[in-house]
Amino acid sequence: MRNDPARTPASTAAAILPLVGGPANVISVAHCVTRLRLGLADPAAVDEEALRALPGVLGVVVDGGSYQVVLGPGVVAEVTAEVEGLVAPAAADRLAARGAELRAAQRQRNATGLKTALRRVANVFVPLIPALIGCGILAGVGGLLVNAGWLPGLTPALAAIASAFMALIAVFVGYRTAKEFGGTPVLGGAVAAVIVYPGVEKVTAFGVHLAPGQGGVLGALAAALLATYVERWCRGRVPGALDVLLTPTVTVLVAGLVTLYGLMYTAGAVSSAIGTGADWLLRTTGAFAGLVLGGLFLPLVMLGLHQALIPIHTTLIQQQGYTVLLPLLAMAGAGQVGAAMAVYVRLRHDTSIRTTIRSALPAGLLGVGEPLIYGVSLPLGRPFLTACAGGAAGGAFVGFFAMLGDKVGATAIGPSGWALFPLLAGNRSPALTAAIYGGGLLTGYAVGFLATYAVFRPGSPRPGRST
C-alpha cells in the first residue's frame, strides 16, 4: 500500500472526504473486503486525480454514481468507520432521495442491459457467500473426521449443520431475488420453498414425478422472479381493501403452479446441462479450458462481472458437492502474485510501489486480488497482461489433470489462493487434490513472475508518470 507509516484510519478518512466533495456530498457509506464505497450526490465534485494520488489509496473504481476507493483488506473497515463518523447524518438524510435518483440515472447512462442484469443476479447471491463458506469448511472438516475415524459421535452433528443451509438454499435465493427485484421477499421465499418441499414427489409434470430440489437455485431464482412480476400485476389491479388477501394468495398460487408444472422441470434440465457441460469441458479440453478461464478471470474481476458466475458455482455445488470451475479461476490470483513479485524485484529503488506490494501481497496470497490489481498491475500496464498469462498457465495445469480424471473442486465459493485449501474436494484423495491445486498455484506464480520479469523494465510506464 502506498502509505505513510504514520497515517492512521482517521487521517486517511479526513483526507479522502474533501476530495470527494466534502461530507455534505456523501449520501451513503459502505465497504466490501477491499473498497470504501461512497454514494455521492454530485459525482462531478470528485477530484479523482488527487484521490488516486492520496497515500493509502490503491485505486479508484467508478460504478455508476458510486465511487469505490480501494484501500485493501482490514484497513478499509477502519477507514469506513471513521468516514461514517465524519459524514453528517442530517446532510445524508437530506440528500438521500436525490442521491438515489442521481445514481439510478448514472447507472442507466453507463451500464449496458447485460451488465445491469448480471449485477442484479450477483446481488442476489453475494449476501449468501458467508454461509456458503462456513458450511463448506464444516463439511470439509466433517469429511476429514469421517475418513480418519475420529469423533464418531460428533460427525453426524457436523454433517447436519453443514448440509442444512444447502438443503434450503432455494428459499434464501427466492427471498433475496424478490427483495432485489422489488417484490415482497417473504413471498419470493414462499414460492421458492415449493422446490425443496418433500411433497412435490407426488406431483407429475411432463409425464414424470418431480423430485424435491429439482431445478435448484436456478429454479428458485426463476420462481421468485415470476412471483415478483405476478405480485406487481396484482397490486395495480386489486382494490385496496382486498389487496392484503388477494395479492399474496394469487402470487403464491400462480407462481407456485407455474413452478411445479414448468420451471422445476426446465430449470432442472438446465442445471443438469451445466453439470454435464462442466464435466465434459474438463474431461475433453481440460488444459485449454483451464488456460482460457484462468487467463480471462482477472479482467472479469476488474469489471466486477466475476460475481455473475456465482449461480453456476452454486448449481455445481448442489449437484456434485463442489464446483470444479473455482480452482481454475483461482489461478488468476496466482498469476497476479507472481507478477507483483517480479515488479518488486525489478523496481528496487521505487519505495512507493514496493511498499504497496508488501502491503497487498498477503491479501493476494489469500485470494483477495483487488489491491494488487488497482495498486500495481493495472496502473503499470504490462504486469496486468503477464499476470493473466500466469493465471492461464496455472489454469492449464489444473485442467490437464482434470483430463486425466483427477478433478479438483471447491465445496464453497468466496475464498481462493491459499485460503481455498480448507474447501478443496474432488474425486481423489484429499492429499492428491491439494497437491494438484498447489501445483497450479506454483505454476501461476512462476509463469507470472517470469513473464513479468522478461517484459517489464524499470523504465517501463509507471503510475503518475507520462509515457
Image (spheres, grey):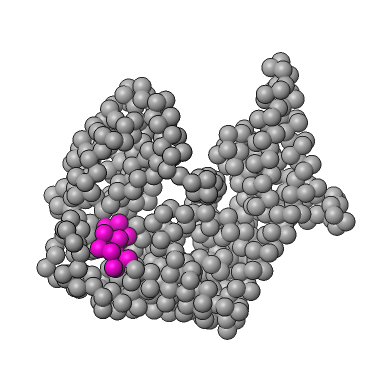
Q: Quadrant of the C terminus?
A: bottom left
Q: Measuring from the top left, give residue 47's x and y in whole percent.
A: 22, 40
Question: What residue is drawn where x is 42% and y is 58%?
Answer: 301
* Residue 3 belongs to the span the image colors magenta: no
Question: What residue is drawn where x is 14% and y is 52%?
Answer: 4
**146 sits left or right of 48 in the view:** right
Q: How many marks?
A: 0
Question: What residue is drawn where x is 65% and y is 39%?
Answer: 188
Q: Is residue 196 visible?
A: yes
Q: Measuring from the top left, give residue 248's x and y in whole percent.
A: 71, 29
Question: What residue is drawn where x is 68% and y is 50%?
Answer: 219
Q: Quadrant of residue 388?
A: bottom left
User: Please, which residue is most extreme toward the left here?
Assistant: 349
Nearer to the camera, 310 or 99: 99
**357 sits left or right of 412 in the view:** left
User: Please, which residue is most extreme toward the bottom here?
Assistant: 404
User: Please, which residue is most extreme toward the right here?
Assistant: 207
- Give the dominant element type of the magenta stretch: helix, strand or loop: helix
**196 sits left or right of 327 in the view:** right
Nearer to the camera, 121 or 72: 121
Q: Quadrant of the N terminus?
A: bottom left
Q: Quadrant of residue 458?
A: bottom left
Q: Is residue 197 visible?
A: no
Q: Quadrant of residue 382?
A: bottom left
User: Magenta region: which residues?
Assistant: 372-384
Q: Measuring from the top left, give residue 377's x and y in whole percent.
A: 29, 63
